[in-house]
Amino acid sequence: MPSLQELIQTHEQEINAFQPANAADLEAYRIKYLGTKGIVKQIFGEMKNVPVEQKKEAGQLLNAFKQLAEKKYEDFQHLQSDAAKKGPALDNTLPGTKLPLGTRHPLRMIENRIVSIFEKIGFSVATGPEIEDDWHNFTSLNIHKDHPARDMQDTFYVAQNPDWVLRTHTSSVQSRILETQPLPVRVICPGRVYRNETISARAHCFFHQCEGLYVDKNVSFADLKQTLYYFVTEMFGEGTKVRFRPSYFPFTEPSAEMDISCTICGGDGCSLCKHTGWVEIMGCGMVHPDMLRNFNIDPGVYTGFAFGMGVERITQLKFQVNDLRLYSQNDVRFLRQFQSI
Ligand code: DAH
């Protein structure tokens, strides 16, 4: 049988070496040494077997041992409060926290839809720079130096260089395509454009357009109409009426504006269609022979059609948004409404 002294020594070594890693380790230690059936109590129980003359010394040893055991426990008591601060243990069976789902911007949704409608009939996507030079944005499109469309009121000029503008329309991409791509070409060109307008519900200093261009041998106005009828049916559904009104653009001849029957009131008249039953959605026409000549294309051999539409207008008709400013305010209350579309 080990003597009381030996017993205490073994336990002392064990206690000195003990390093609890967490509150559970510490609790196991407490039960083992300091609990009601713990080692300290057990050794105290041995005192009755100690001969009287050794009791004093044994008592001192025992007390020292008890203090050692208690001190160790106190030294690590912070582990308990750390565990309490962390709160209850993680329950992996609970359902997870849902991450909010982002949405596509309504303008991007409509732009994607326009592009995919034209891709189905063989158009491919083309883009160009938003900072454009005079030639691509104006001159090559027959918009000469004295044309009112260049007015300082409308165009943002780049301060460093009077030859540079923020493009005022995506028609500039037509020029870039005719300049670089071999014929025939069939492109759809979405992008942002800029005009110096006072911001209001009906106007903004930047907005979005989608340009279309088709140049080949024997392209006729009938092809233009057929292509746009197809677009309107795909975008707004069967039964949407279409009409062409003669118009003027420097880069097309003849030129037209295309209206569709109002999708909001079905043609009965409302504030969107200004009680006419019709809404203008794009400008279009046959590419002007002078414009073809600007790119060394013989208008006796090649003809083409072009069109340009405002993406905001199409989006307004599809989603009944009545204030253009909403598109760029980044208000999640607005944007979240398009979550399920
Ligand atoms: N660029 C014109 C605008 O911004 C829209 C336009 C009209 C584009 C007729 C065309 C077109 O391609 O043929 O108002």
Image (cartoon, rainbow, N blue to C red):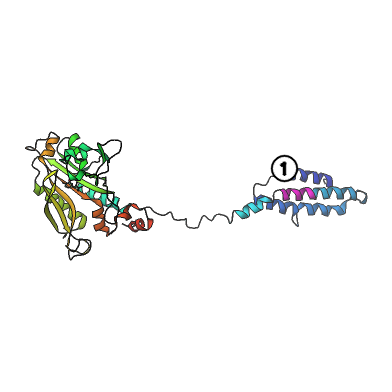
> Which amino acid, mark 1?
Ala
Q: Give the quadrant of residue 141.
A: top left
Q: Is residue 100 left or right of residue 294?
A: right
In the displayed structure, 292 sits above or below 103; it is above
Point out the residue furthest to the bottom here.
268
- The residue segment tinted magenta is 66-76
Q: Which x, y percent locates residue 262?
A: 19, 61
Q: Quadrant of residue 214?
A: top left
Q: Residue at x 92, y 51 (%)?
A: 52
Residue at the limit of the structure toward the left, as seen here: 300
Which residue is more in the foreground, 192 or 241? Answer: 192
Q: Is mark 1 within 8 Å of ligand 1?
A: no
Which residue is more in the foreground, 166 or 93?
166
Whether residue 202 appears in this view of the structure is: yes
Q: Which is more toward the observer, 29 or 5?
A: 29
Q: Classify mark 1: helix, strand or loop.
A: helix
Question: Does the segment drawn in magenta span residue 298?
Answer: no
Q: Nearer the viewer, residue 202 or 312?
A: 202
Q: Residue at x 86, y 53 (%)?
A: 47
* Snapshot quadrant of residue 292: top left
Per the image, the residue denoted by label 1 is 17
> Does residue 159 appear left or right of residue 277 in this picture?
right
Residue 144 point in image, percent of width and height? 16, 40
Q: From the viewer's perspective, is residue 228 above or below residue 239?
A: above
**Is 74 inside the magenta-drawn segment?**
yes
Q: Is residue 119 visible?
A: no
Label 1 crowd (10 A; few <14 / some 14-19 / many >=20) = few
Q: Residue at x 8, y 45 (%)?
A: 220
Q: Where does the image place residue 67, in percent across and percent down from the top left? A: 79, 49
What is the magenta segment's predominant secondary structure?
helix
Report x, y in % for residue 341: 31, 57
